[in-house]
Each structure stands twice: as structure tokens, then as C-alpha cells.
């Protein structure tokens, strides 16, 4: 009963297509909606074939989840990979300290920085050794992304786009041996920087409306169309294009393809590109470009015709872990900005802060010395709660991102988990940014003069004489776009939560049970046999959700009593959510996918699953001696339990967050030392201790 699997039966692809279209028509969908939904579903199902095994999250909802499948594992790179990572980060830190990391005139990283990274093997980390790389596993790259984010967040995005979205991952997964031999060594050497072009002016969340076409003609593709906005697409680089193929006799909606495009070094008669002026990713090249009758060799097709979207979805699934890890790192960087004192760091980062009253923050920064009603602002329960929640959710988001990498590296496509890793971490980052903005107060809206004058001087070619004697910095307010864009990049959160996740969570159920019912009824029958099968599956799931024991905990290390309890509670919640999904299906029948407020975000099943899975994955990372981290695990479990009731918080949860927040603001705590103690922070805007400098 508890070992139910949802592997859909093998059927004729044409029969499945017709069944889905017929059911959607019965549900009142228009022809355009049917085309879009069936294209999306076909791409999702095709992407599944690129991986093996059942998605762990789906198994935990409707069967027996295996705890070891949710263990993010440990960072264990090979000596070669570790050396490349260490050398690259050291090099970047040296350039940052010397002020030679960024070219403010061009708003790019300095060319010799890119060259230096290439010489150290940075761009070949995720490329196998036989193609000139270091052969790093995806699961080894989370700590590197965190370090890159701390140096400069755009470095992490550049690394993600080059490796996970494209072209490294698509070429490795779908390329011929000739394509791998030709392109990967050049990418590993940093000769070709990569980008991934899916979005178009009218195509973002709905990829069924691709308008860039590639017409097969005399052994080559003639490509026409516009891609926009595309990150990291540079002159002389390499770009993976997702296009609509013409000339392959493919059905509409199933005619996508993936092409390798070598970007010219200048604009040509067939290629025009213009850089976008963004308020985020401002040191990356992000552009819009047009191809006009542009020839691309037929040998540059990646994978079979008609599978471009499926392959794109496969790459997106691997890339979402990077967004989660990156967002978690930014969360801790924000916390460091309001807790730490840059003046103290300059003197002696290890020196204790004297005269800190018992129970009051002693980090030395804004939360310690800004006085509100006679006490440091960090003593306020609300501030402690905000900081504690950000700490716990940042840790959980980081773990979810690492797990996303590990699953992809092991050939497991858990689409729902990938969306959770991205949505959970980016929502936590945005909430943390808003709260830090509020804690910093009105000074958050002040211009970051260091950035402002660096750009101004680069434009006019002047010396630094025009600068004020004491520049006002502003990391939090100046970067709000950076914190917000994370909720949009690689799929807007609302679309993933209300469309992508419900589709992923119910796909196997629809294929195995609902499509046969729909076909039978649309053909004039009752579908009683098919309904009986679905009823039996529903009954087994309901009974399973009521059982006291949940989840296979074999193979889990350090399984002490508290850890066992937290893991089992999480599996219990997931089974209840699986039951809720079936209840929604039974209630709304063919229109259940329209109930995004029940299946999606803001209190829906997916929202609850985000918190339950965050609690589960973080609990699995616990060790017996990590007492402060156990406080985090207990708080995450409590939050997930409360979310199951439709509430967001409670006095008990607020108290748990506040306890964690106090620890984060205490320089003697393990959480403070591990997460932010050694971070470099910028000056406090209009630092009140030195107000005479600014007046």
C-alpha cells in the first residue's frame, strides 16, 4: 500500500496527445490554450526521459519517500577541482581588494580578470577532463557559488549561465561527440563564454509561442527572429538558441529545436545586437539581438528535432539549484550588512565588543548601536524575529539548492524540488531585503556614492578630484533590484508555483488515471472502470496519510532521536499534502488545474510543500553536536506545521525566530561565526558616529 509508484504506462504518443486535447476541450479550453498547455506538457514529459528514477518529492507525496534521496550530502571535490576553486576565489579577492576587479567605464569585469580566471581553469570546472576541464560534479559547486556571490553576485550568475543553462550542460547532455570535442575544450579554456537564449519579446513564461524560426535549407538552417533579454551573450561567444524548426514536418507545438550559435565578433548583415541597460546584473553583458536570414550549419543542431523545449527544461531543472544557493548567500550578506561593524573589522575582526549588556546584540554594527527607546534596535523582538527567520530560511534555502545540484548530478529529475529550491530561497531573500531596508531606515534610499562616482568618472574621463571627501555607501538600498530579480530569473515565482509545480505534481496522476477517464467520457461512455482505478489509488493514499510511520530512513547518518522525529514529521506532512492534491482533483474534476490558489502559492499545496521540504532537507543535514542549528531545525519544523493549518506564524514561532535572531547578533555564537563572522561589509550609510564627515 505504501509503495505506490506513479510511473505512467507506456502508450502511443499520438494517442496521448489526442487524449489531452480532447479532455482540455471538454474542460472548456480554447484552441490556443490547448496548444499552449499540450506543448508545455509534451516538453515536460520528454524532459523526463533525460533522467532516471522516480522524483523523490512525488514519491513522498503519494508513496514511500526515502530520506536519503533528500540528503544534500557533503562538499567533497577532487583535489584538482578544489585547487581550481581555491585559486580562482583567491585571485578574485586579490583583484577586489586592489580595486581592479571591475571596469566601470564598460560596466564589465576587467578583461584581464576574465583572462586570469580562464588561466586558472575557472570556466572548465564543470567540463569533464577529457574535454580540457576539471570534471567537477554539480554537487561540488554550491560552495563556489556562495563564495562568488560574496565577491560579486554577477560572478555567480556568469558562472551559472556558462555552465548550467548553456552551453556546457546542453552540449554534455545532448551533443554529439564531434560537438563535444569541438566546443567544450574552447569553453574550458575561456575562449568561448556561453549563454542560453529561450526568452523573446513576447515569450517568457509560455515557451509555446516561440517566434524565432530555423528553416532547414540545403544542409543549413536559416534563422530569423529576436531573442531578448539574454544574459552573458557577448560578441565572440557561444549561445544556445531555442527555435521553432521549419522543414522537418513536425507538428505545431512539437517543432522546437536547440541550435549552437557562434556569436560573431561584430554586428553583421545577418546579426545585430544591442546591450540592455539593466538595474540588476549591471556588470554582465545582457542584450537583445536579431538574426536575419542567418545561416547556421545543420550539424549545430543539439539533440533530435522537436526536442528543443524538452532539452531547455532539462537544463533549467539543473540551473535552479544555482539560483537557490546564490539567493541564500545574498540573504546572509544582507544580514552581515546590518549586524557587523566595518570599523571594527578594519581594526581587529576577532576582538570582542565591550560593554554589551546581557541579552543585547554585540555584533557592533547597526543593530547594536542604533538606539530605539533607550535600547539597541537589535533588542526589539520584531527585529530579532526578522533576523532569525532570515537565518533559518537562508540555511534551508542553501540546503535545498545543494540538493537540487546533487539530484541533477545523479541523473534524477525532481522538477518539483527544483522549483521549490528556487522559489523558497528567492522569496526568503526578497523578504530579508525588505526587512533590512526597514531596519536601516531612511538612509536606505540614499545613493551609493562610491558606485555613482566610479561610473561618472569613467564616463567623463576625469580624475577622482570630483569625489566628496567621504563617500556614502549603500549596499542594501542600491541593490534592491538585485534581490528582486532573483524571483523572476529562470522562471517567475508565480508562474512556477501556480502553473509549473501543479503540472509537475499531478502529471503522473493525469497520465495514469485521469486521461483514461476523460477519454472514456468524451467518447460517450461512463468510464466506470477507469474511475474505480483512480478511486482505489485515492483510497490507498488517504489511508497511507493516516498511518503513524512515514518515510524510509535507511542509510541516514547521525540519526539521533530529535533528527528522526523531525524527518518523520516532514514525511507525514508530505503524505497529507498528497492526500490534499487528490481531494482537489476529485472535487474539481477536469478543471482542477485552474485552481492555482489551492495548488499553488500563497497558502496552496505548493506553498506548504516548500516549507515542509525545507524542514525535511535541513533536518537531514543536522549533526548531534550542532545545538544552535537544532534550534533552526525546530523552528523550520514548527513553521511547516503551522503552514499546514493555513496560518503563517504563531507566538511560539515568533519566539523561536527571535531566539535564533539573538544568536545571529551575538559574536560569540556558532551561527554568527559560521555564517557571517568573516564577511566583509561596506560602510554604514551616513554612519552616525562620523556625522561630521558628511556635514
Image: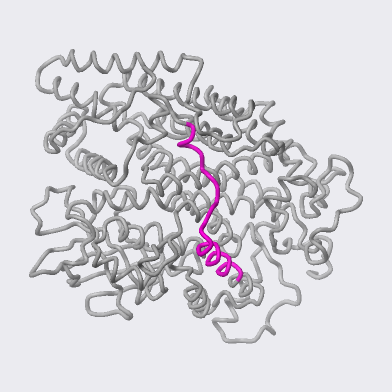
Residue 67 makes an appearance in the image: yes
In this rendering, position of residue 238 left or right of residue 464:
left
The image position of residue 505, as x and y in percent, is 36, 32
650, 538: nearer the viewer = 538
In this rendering, position of residue 246 left or right of residue 9:
left
459, 11: nearer the viewer = 11
The image position of residue 145, as x and y in percent, is 53, 58
Q: Quadrant of residue 247?
A: bottom left
**Magenta stretch, residue numbers:** 67-90
Is 88 magenta? The answer is yes
223, 529: nearer the viewer = 529
Residue 326 makes an appearance in the image: no
In this rendering, position of residue 381 left or right of residue 242:
right
The image position of residue 75, as x and y in percent, is 55, 51
Image height of 614 relative to 316, above or below = above
463, 355: nearer the viewer = 355
The image position of residue 27, as x and y in percent, is 22, 27
* Residue drawn 63% across the image and 43% down it: 390
Is 27 magenta? The answer is no
Q: Quadrant of residue 508?
A: top left
Q: Quadrant of the C terminus?
A: bottom right
Q: Quadrant of the N terminus?
A: top left
Amino acid at each position: 500500500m505504501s509503495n505506490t509508484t506513479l510511473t505512467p504506462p507506456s502508450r502511443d504518443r499520438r494517442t496521448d496527445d489526442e487524449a489531452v486535447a480532447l479532455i482540455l476541450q471538454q474542460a472548456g479550453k480554447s484552441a490556443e490554450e490547448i496548444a499552449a498547455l499540450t506543448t508545455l506538457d509534451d516538453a515536460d514529459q520528454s524532459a523526463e526521459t533525460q533522467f532516471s528514477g522516480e522524483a523523490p518529492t512525488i514519491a513522498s507525496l503519494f508513496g514511500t519517500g526515502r530520506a536519503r534521496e533528500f540528503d544534500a550530502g557533503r562538499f567533497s571535490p577532487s583535489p584538482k577541482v578544489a585547487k581550481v576553486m581555491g585559486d580562482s576565489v583567491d585571485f578574485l579577492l586579490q583583484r577586489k581588494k586592489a580595486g581592479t576587479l571591475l571596469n566601470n567605464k564598460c560596466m564589465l569585469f576587467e578583461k584581464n580578470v576574465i583572462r586570469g580566471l580562464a588561466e586558472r581553469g575557472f570556466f572548465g570546472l564543470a567540463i569533464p577532463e577529457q574535454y580540457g576541464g576539471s570534471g567537477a560534479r554539480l554537487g561540488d559547486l554550491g560552495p563556489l557559488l556562495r563564495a562568488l556571490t560574496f565577491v560579486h553576485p554577477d560572478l555567480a550568475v556568469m558562472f551559472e549561465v556558462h555552465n548550467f543553462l548553456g552551453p556546457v550542460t546542453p552540449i554534455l547532455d545532448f551533443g554529439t561527440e564531434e560537438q563535444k570535442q569541438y566546443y567544450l575544450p574552447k569553453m574550458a579554456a575561456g575562449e568561448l563564454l556561453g549563454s542560453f537564449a529561450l526568452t523573446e519579446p513576447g515569450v517568457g513564461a509560455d515557451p509555446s509561442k516561440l517566434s524565432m524560426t530555423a528553416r532547414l535549407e540545403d544542409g543549413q538552417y536559416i534563422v530569423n527572429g529576436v531573442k531578448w533579454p539574454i544574459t552573458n551573450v557577448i560578441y565572440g561567444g557561444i549561445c544556445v538558441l531555442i527555435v521553432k524548426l521549419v522543414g522537418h514536418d513536425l507538428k505545431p507545438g512539437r517543432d522546437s529545436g536547440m541550435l549552437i550559435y557562434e556569436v560573431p565578433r561584430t554586428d553583421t548583415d545577418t546579426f545585430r545586437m544591442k546591450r540592455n541597460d539593466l538595474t540588476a546584473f549591471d556588470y554582465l553583458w545582457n542584450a537583445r539581438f536579431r538574426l536575419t536570414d542567418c545561416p547556421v550549419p545543420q550539424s549545430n543542431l543539439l539533440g533530435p528535432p522537436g526536442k528543443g523545449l524538452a532539452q531547455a527544461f532539462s537544463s533549467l531543472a539543473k540551473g535552479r539549484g544555482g539560483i537557490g544557493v546564490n539567493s541564500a548567500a545574498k540573504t546572509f550578506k544582507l544580514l552581515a550588512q546590518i549586524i557587523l561593524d566595518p570599523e571594527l573589522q578594519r581594526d581587529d575582526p576577532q576582538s570582542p565588543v565591550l560593554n554589551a549588556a546581557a541579552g543585547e546584540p554585540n555584533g557592533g554594527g547597526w543593530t547594536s548601536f542604533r538606539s530605539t527607546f533607550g535600547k539597541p534596535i537589535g533588542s526589539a523582538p520584531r527585529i530579532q524575529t526578522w533576523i532569525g527567520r532570515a537565518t533559518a530560511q537562508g540555511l534551508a534555502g542553501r540546503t535545498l539548492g545543494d540538493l537540487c545540484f546533487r539530484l541533477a548530478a545523479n541523473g534524477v529529475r525532481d522538477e518539483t524540488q527544483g522549483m521549490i529550491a528556487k522559489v523558497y530561497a528567492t522569496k526568503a531573500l526578497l523578504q530579508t531585503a525588505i526587512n533590512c531596508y526597514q531596519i536601516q531606515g531612511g538612509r536606505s534610499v540614499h545613493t551609493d556614492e562610491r558606485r555613482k562616482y566610479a561610473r561618472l568618472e569613467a564616463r567623463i574621463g576625469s580624475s577622482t578630484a570630483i569625489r566628496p571627501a567621504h563617500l556614502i555607501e549603500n549596499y542594501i538600498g542600491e541593490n534592491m533590484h538585485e534581490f528582486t530579480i532573483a524571483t523572476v530569473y529562470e522562471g517567475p515565482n508565480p508562474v512556477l508555483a501556480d502553473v509549473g509545480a501543479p503540472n509537475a505534481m499531478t502529471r503522473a496522476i493525469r497520465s495514469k488515471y485521469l486521461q483514461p477517464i476523460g477519454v472514456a467520457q468524451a467518447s460517450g461512455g461512463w468510464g466506470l472502470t477507469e474511475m474505480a482505478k483512480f478511486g482505489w489509488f485515492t483510497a490507498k493514499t488517504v489511508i497511507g496519510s493516516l498511518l503513524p510511520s512515514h518515510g524510509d530512513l535507511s542509510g541516514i547518518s547521525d540519526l539521533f532521536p530529535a533528527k528522526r522525529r523531525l524527518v518523520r514529521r516532514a514525511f507525514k506532512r508530505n503524505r497529507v499534502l498528497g492526500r490534499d492534491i487528490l481531494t482537489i482533483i476529485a472535487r474539481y474534476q477536469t478543471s482542477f488545474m485552474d485552481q492555482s490558489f489551492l495548488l499553488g502559492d500563497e497558502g496552496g499545496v505548493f506553498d506548504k510543500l516548500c516549507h515542509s521540504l525545507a524542514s525535511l532537507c535541513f533536518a537531514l543535514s543536522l549533526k548531534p553536536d550542532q545545538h544552535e542549528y537544532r534550534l533552526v531545525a525546530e523552528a523550520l519544523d514548527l513553521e511547516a506545521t503551522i503552514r499546514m493549518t493555513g496560518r503563517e506564524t504563531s507566538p511560539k514561532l515568533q519566539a523561536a525566530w527571535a531566539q535564533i535572531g539573538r544568536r545571529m547578533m551575538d559574536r560569540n555564537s556558532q551561527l554568527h561565526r559560521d555564517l557571517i563572522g568573516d564577511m566583509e561589509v561596506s560602510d554604514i550609510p551616513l554612519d552616525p558616529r562620523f556625522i561630521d564627515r558628511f556635514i
